[in-house]
Image (cartoon, rainbow, N blue to C red):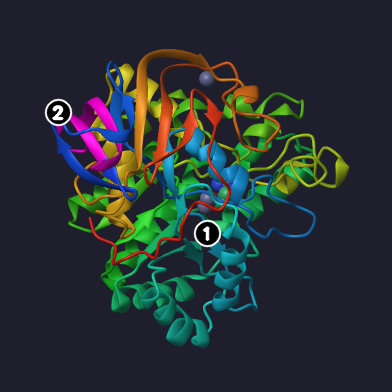
Amino acid sequence: TAFDLVIRNADVATASDRFQCDIGIRDGKIEALGKQLPAGAEEIDASGLLVLPGGVDAHCHLDQPMPDGMRMADDFFSGTRSAACGGTTTVIPFAAQAKGGSLNAAVEDYHARAAGKAVIDYAFHLIVADPTPQVLQEELPNLIRQGYTSFKIYMTYDDLKLNDREILEVLSVAREHKALVMIHAENSDCIGWLTDRLSQAGQTAPKYHALSRPMAVEREATHRAITFSELVDVPILIVHVSGREAIEQIRWAHGRGLRIYAETCPQYLFLTEHDLGGEGYHGAKCVCSPPPRDHENQKAVWDGLTNGVFSIFSSDHAPFRYDDAQGKKLGGKEQPFQYIPNGIPGLETRLPLLFSGGVMAGRLDVHQFVALTSTNPAKMYGLYPRKGSIMIGADADIVLWDTKCKVVINNALLHHEVDYTPYEGTTVQGWPVLTLSRGKVVSKDQSFVGTAGSGQFLPCGTPSI
Ligand code: URP
Ligand code: ZN
Ligand code: ZN
Ligand code: ZN
C-alpha cells in the first residue's frame, strides 16, 4: 500500500487556508493531500469533523526542579498525556538553570527527565537564572547552536530574577546568536514591598496574592523590558500578559516600530481575581503570576487576540496539587499567599477553552485560532515547517475536532496528575476527539491511547516570524 494511514474527507483549516481533501501519511509524515487518494493500511473517516494541525504549547512547566519542599505534579509522561488529550502535539517546557549552577547541567538533567516518558514531541526553552561570563560567552552560544534557541528570563522571583544589567547582557547574546528571549515582566521590589505591607496588616488569604501584584507592577516591568529590547535592538517576547495596561505598553512599542511579541494564556480570559476567593483557601487553586484580573481586563485580552497584539496563546501549565504538602498546601498547611506555589494547570484545557470562547463565540476565525495555538509558536521557536501546519512534508501531527460536541469541564475527564482544574464546571463547545502524533493515534474520544517514550526531542532552528 501507498500509505500507512489515510484520513478521508478531511475539512482542513490551517493558519491561512481551508480545503477538503484526503490526507495520506507515511512514516509519520504527511505525504499527500488530494482527492481520492489510494488506500492506506489504515483509514480514518473525518466526515463532519474539523481537521487542524496539532497544537504547539510553547509555555508549560513539566517536572521542573522547585525550591525546597515544592514539587510539580506532572512529569513528562502525565503532562504530555494531558496535552495530547487536549489536542496538543508539541510542548516546549523549560530547562531551568539554578543560581550558581551550569546551564549545560540543567539541559542534561532535563533530557533525563523527558527520556522514555514523553508521549508527544518536545523541545526545550532554557531559563537563564545566573548569567555568569561562562554562561554568556560559552554555554549559551553553544546551546543555541545545538537547538536551544529560546530562553526565558525573570524580572521577579528571588531564585530566578535578573537585574537590569544582567537582562541587557542576556539580550545582547540573543541578538548576536539570533535567539529569542521570553521575559516574565513583573517588578520584584514593588511586589516585595506590597507583600510586606499586606502581611503586616494580617492580610494573608490567597485573594491578597492579586493585591500584591497589581497591574501597575506588570505595566512598569513590561515598559522596562520594551526599553531594553530597544536599547539592545533585539526582538523579545513578553510572556503571560494579563491585561489592558500591559497591552497598552506593547501597542505603544508597536507604534514605534519595535519588535515586541506577546503571549497570553487561558487564565487571563476565563478567571478573575474573584476566583482567588474570599477568606477561604480554595482560591489557592487559581494563584498564578501575573494574577487573573477583572472582567474589563479579560475583554482587553480577548480584543488583543482578535486584533493581533498577541502572537501566541500558551497554557503556562505549572502543575501543583491543591491538597498536597508539596503543592498549594505547602508543608501540609494553608499558607499565607506569598508562600503558595505559583501556577495552575492548563495543558489539556488550553485549546478547548480558546476554541469555544474564541471560534465558536465569533471572536476569532479558525485561522486565527490555528495561528495563535500552533503555527505562530512553531515559527517563533524554529520548529516550522516540521510543526505548525498541515502540508506535504510536515509531521503528521493532526487533530480532529468535533465542533458540535459540548463538554462540561470536570477534573475527572482530564489526564494530568493535578487534583483540580481551575475551569471546573465551565461548558465548552468543540472538543479534540482524535489526536495523531507523527501519524500515530495518541488520544481518542477523551481516552489516552499513546505510549510513554514515543515523543522525540526537537532541536529548534532560528526563531522566525
Ligand atoms: O504562576 C506562574 N505562572 N508560575 C509559573 C512560572 C511562570 O512564571 O511562568
Ligand atoms: Zn513567568
Ligand atoms: Zn467580577
Ligand atoms: Zn510559566
Q: Nearer the viewer, residue 380 or 297?
A: 380
Magenta stretch: dominant SS? strand
In this image, 196 relative to 172: left or right? right
Three-letter residue code for mark 2: Gln
**Residue at 29% of width from left, 72% of height from top?**
178
Q: Secondary structure at mark 1?
A: strand
Q: Nearer the viewer, mark 1 or mark 2?
A: 2
Question: Can residue 15 be found in the magenta stretch?
Answer: yes
Q: Earlier in the sequence, mark 1 or mark 2?
A: 2
- The image shows residue 193 at horizontal and vertical percentages of 65, 53
Q: Secondary structure at mark 2?
A: loop
Q: Which residue is mark 2?
A: 36
- The magenta segment is 1-24
**Residue at 35% of width from left, 27% of height from top?**
400
- The image shows residue 269 at horizontal and vertical percentages of 44, 29
Three-letter residue code for mark 1: Phe
Q: CA distance from mark 1 to mark 2?
A: 43 Å
- The image shows residue 58 at horizontal and vertical percentages of 42, 50
Q: Where the C terminus falls, by quadrant?
A: bottom left
